[in-house]
Image: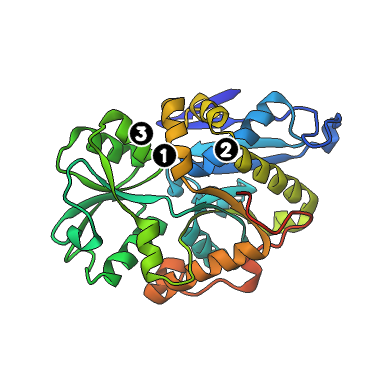
């Protein structure tokens, strides 16, 4: 593996070998195409880790080049400038980019469901209304976590900023450090960062599962946190290549969920979480998946509709057009898990 570092953000450059993953037959260099992928450190990359590992081992058909970054803001410019073919980003941001790029961005998979949690080291929060008058530390301003949390607060009679103060941080690692050392901190965190914090401070407990809170107020519209997107022009020009990637991605996601011990070793080995024990603890609660086809549209469209009704700006001012949803070829129309 060749690893690059730019500041605090590690960039993992994965070069595929010359064997086809499924057929196990040699692939000539001219058949191998480069696929640049940007992924957020967390559940999205946890689901991608087998694909990364296989590429390093030379058993993937294509040259997957994966950059692991800390925030969505580091991915957006690469998408807009066509510097990546595929990116893993918050679900609402995909809709925003679809509007801003006049339809150039297309969603190809749902990869993370509602893995958001309210955590604290005390024992004071047992319901959403217990957050009244409190300060909550969070990441994800302008992305799914902000809009999801705001929607849940308002549905429970609390106005963000007035009834509940939200202090926004740039990265999950900042919150992890804060929770590990603070005794009176309430935070909104996704996995695997909840597991990381609990490893450092066993007193930290999960007070609320926001997926459950969402289900109580949003009948029929599941909570979708992360998706995979692609450049529409690239997808149209390379349908077979995209189909190969989706098949590899589904297999990788299935491996993470079914082979937890092995996946945890790979996740730790690639620096996504500090060690394998933490990764193994985080995987079952991370709600990693790979939903494509008609189920992708069903799952994501309902979620975006709820966000749009709550705040049109959360999805770019309008719901995405029909061609926002990619229909893959040759893949089972079902989740990977």
Mark 2, Cα crowd under 10 Å, few <14 / some 14-19 / many 20+, is many
Instruction: Judge whether 256 appears above or below 318 on screen.
Output: above
Residue 192 marker: 1
Residue marked by disc 3: 196
Instruction: Residue 131 in the image: state x and y as whole percent.
Output: 19, 58
Residue 256 marker: 2
Cα separation between marks 2 and 1: 13 Å
Colour scheme of the picture: rainbow
Q: Is residue 1 in sight in this rendering?
A: yes
Q: Looking at the image, do the residues carrying marks 3 and 2 touch, with CB atoms under 8 Å apart? A: no
Image quarter (top left, top right, bottom left or bottom right) of the N terminus: top right
Q: Earlier in the sequence, mark 2 or mark 1?
A: 1
Q: Nearer the viewer, residue 77 or 186?
A: 186
Front: mark 2 or 1: 2
The residue lying at 74 percent from left, 29 percent from top is 59
> Is residue 165 toward the left or the right of residue 195 in the image?
left
Instruction: Judge whether 272 appears above or below 167 on screen.
Output: above
> Is residue 250 toward the left or the right of residue 283 in the image?
right
Q: Looking at the image, do the residues carrying marks 1 and 3 touch, with CB atoms under 8 Å apart? A: yes
């Amino acid at each position: 593996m060749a690893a690059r570092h730019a500041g605090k953000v590690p960039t993992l450059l994965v070069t595929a070998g010359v064997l086809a993953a499924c057929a196990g037959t040699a692939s000539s260099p001219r058949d191998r195409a480069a696929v640049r992928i940007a992924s957020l450190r967390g559940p999205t990359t946890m689901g991608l880790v087998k694909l990364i590992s296989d590429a390093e081992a030379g058993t993937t058909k294509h040259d997957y080049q994966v950059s692991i970054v800390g925030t969505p803001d580091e991915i957006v410019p690469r998408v807009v400038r066509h510097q990546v073919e595929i990116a893993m980003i918050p679900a609402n941001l995909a809709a925003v980019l679809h509007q801003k790029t006049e339809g150039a961005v297309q969603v190809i998979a749902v990869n993370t469901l509602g893995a958001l949690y309210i955590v604290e080291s005390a024992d004071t929060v047992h319901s959403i209304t217990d957050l009244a008058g409190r300060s909550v530390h969070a990441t994800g301003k302008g992305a799914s976590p902000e809009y999801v949390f705001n929607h849940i607060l308002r549905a429970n009679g609390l106005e963000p900023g007035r009834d509940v103060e939200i202090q926004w941080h740039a990265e999950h690692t900042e919150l992890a450090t804060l929770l590990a050392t603070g005794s009176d901190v309430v935070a909104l965190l996704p996995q695997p960062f909840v597991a990381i914090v609990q490893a450092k401070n066993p007193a930290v407990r999960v007070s609320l599962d926001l997926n459950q809170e969402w289900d109580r107020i949003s009948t029929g519209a599941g909570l979708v946190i992360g998706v995979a997107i692609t450049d529409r022009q690239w997808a149209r020009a390379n349908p077979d290549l995209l189909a190969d990637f989706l098949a590899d991605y589904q297999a990788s996601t299935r491996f993470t969920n079914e082979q937890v011990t092995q996946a945890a070793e790979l996740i730790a080995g690639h620096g996504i979480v500090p060690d394998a024990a933490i990764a193994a603890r985080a995987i079952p609660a991370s709600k990693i998946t790979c939903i494509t086809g008609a189920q992708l549209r069903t799952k994501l469209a309902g979620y975006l509709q709820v966000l749009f009704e709550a705040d049109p700006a959360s999805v770019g001012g309008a719901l995405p057009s029909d061609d926002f949803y990619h229909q893959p070829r040759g893949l089972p129309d079902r989740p990977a898990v």
